[in-house]
């Protein structure tokens, strides 16, 4: 998948590419095999660790020169991508900050994934309102 990003009224134009349906995430150590997860030995953020999840966050930047050669110029992982998350920027301003402790970003929830009981409760409340 390819997307062209443009900025109206400015000179910024660049193309973004998706790693969907490729081995890219495995090549850059942000996706992990079932065997790595079972052994609790996944290489992420420059160290072997127990990730617990099949995928983790990461950003990589590449440059294609006029001759068509592609260069990997930058990668960052974990807290290195905080500047790309508006949620983190706001939480870092408040007195208790992220208040994560050793739990990591436990507060992050995808808008389409809920615990079954909470989702059932919401459906029941909506149905009772008629």
Image: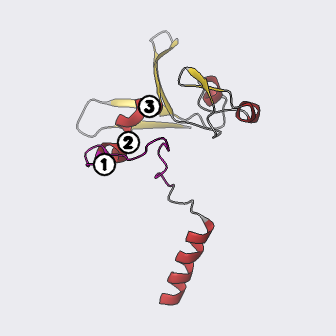
Q: Nearer the viewer, mark 1 or mark 2?
A: 1
What is the C-alpha distance between the residues marked 3 and 1? Answer: 38 Å
Relative height, residue 89 to residue 76 (above, below)? below
Describe the element under mark 2 as helix, strand or loop. Answer: loop
The magenta stretch is 90-109
Q: Is residue 130 above or below residue 41?
A: below
Q: Main secondary structure of the magenta part?
A: loop
Q: Position of residue 8 (x, y in %)?
A: 27, 40
Q: Specify whether residue 98 is painted magenta.
A: yes
Sequence-earlier tag: 3 or 1: 3
Q: Quadrant of the N terminus?
A: top right
Query: CB atoms at circles 3 and 2 under 8 Å apart?
Result: no
User: In which quadrant of the rendered view does residue 30 lie?
Assistant: top right
Name the residue carrying label 2. 85
Residue 24 image position (x, y, % from top left): 62, 27
Image quadrant assignment for residue 54: top right
């Amino acid at each position: 998948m390819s997307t062209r990003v443009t900025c109206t009224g400015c000179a910024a134009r660049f193309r973004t590419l998706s790693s969907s349906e490729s081995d890219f995430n495995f090549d850059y150590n942000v996706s992990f095999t079932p065997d790595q997860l079972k052994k609790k030995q996944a290489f992420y953020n420059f160290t072997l660790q127990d990730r617990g999840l099949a995928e983790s966050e990461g950003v990589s930047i590449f440059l294609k020169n006029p001759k068509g050669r592609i260069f990997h110029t930058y990668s960052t992982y974990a807290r290195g991508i905080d500047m790309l998350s508006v949620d983190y920027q706001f939480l870092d301003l408040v007195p208790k900050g992220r208040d994560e402790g050793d739990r990591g970003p436990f507060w992050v929830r995808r808008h389409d994934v809920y615990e079954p009981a909470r989702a059932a409760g919401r459906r029941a409340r909506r149905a009772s309102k008629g």
